[in-house]
Amino acid sequence: MRERLTARVLLFDGSGRILLMKGRLPNRPLHTSSWFTVGGGVEPGESLEAAALREIGEETGFLDVELGPVVWTREAVGDLASGERVIFKESYIVARCGGGEPSRAGWEAHENSLIDDIRWWALEELAATAERVFPERFLDLIGAVAGGDYPPSPLEITIVRA
């Protein structure tokens, strides 16, 4: 099975809100949507940082972005929009921008069909929501990162199943 390097972005605005997208995997029905971070695959020859900036631009339209460190990593098997099954090797990178209304102008056709919403969340709103937020442990870990308390080396997010 092919490994897919993925840049996931914890994108914060000047008010400390985080930008999340709501969508579902290609093989899942609408009612299985969850909120997740901006980001996507690293192209051949592209650095993780370059991929993060490209994905931010494509998925939000924001170009004036300051990247911070990689704070989390995660590996999981999943499906691409093409149906290919891959091992996602995700790196979660902190980024900050001025905020504003995100643009969908750079979205690909599959993103338009699988992503239902994109919005800024205050941490208090996230703590109170009953909706699924991805990845696992997101709500446990995001507060420290939002406050600028970064781990000395990236934390490996493990999948917790009940």
Image (spheres, grey):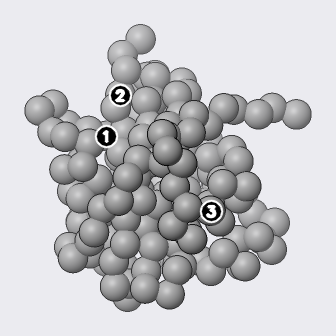
Amino acid at the residue labelled 3: Ala
Residue density around tag 3, few if under 14, some if 14–19, many if 20 or more, within 10 Å: few
Q: Quadrant of residue 64?
A: bottom left
Does residue 154 lie above or below 115 as drawn? above
Q: Judging from the image, what secondary structure is the residue with disc 1 in?
A: strand
Looking at the image, tell me whether mark 1 or mark 2 is earlier in sequence order.
2
Q: CA distance from mark 2 to mark 3?
A: 28 Å
Q: CA distance from mark 1 to mark 3?
A: 26 Å
Residue extending farthest left: 45
Of labels 1 and 3, the one closer to you:
3
Does residue 27 lie above or below 113 as drawn? above
Residue that numbered label 2 is attached to: 4
- CB of mark 1 within 8 Å of CB of mark 2? yes
Residue density around tag 1, few if under 14, some if 14–19, many if 20 or more, within 10 Å: some
Q: Position of residue 96 (x, y in %)?
A: 37, 72
How many marks the image carries: the answer is 3
Residue that numbered label 1 is attached to: 41
Amino acid at the residue labelled 1: Gly
Residue 34 left/right relative to 1: right
Q: Quadrant of residue 90?
A: top left
Is residue 38 among the parts visible in the rendering?
no
Q: Judging from the image, what secondary structure is the residue with disc 3 in?
A: helix
Q: Looking at the image, which residue is at 81% across and 66% down?
A: 130
Q: Position of residue 138 (x, y in %)?
A: 66, 53
Q: Which mark is residue 148?
A: none
Q: CA distance from mark 1 to mark 2?
A: 7 Å
Amino acid at the residue labelled 2: Arg
- CB of mark 2 within 8 Å of CB of mark 3? no
Towards the viewer: 89 or 157: 157
Q: Looking at the image, which residue is at 66% across and 32% down?
A: 158
Residue that numbered label 3 is attached to: 144
Is residue 44 among the parts visible in the rendering?
yes
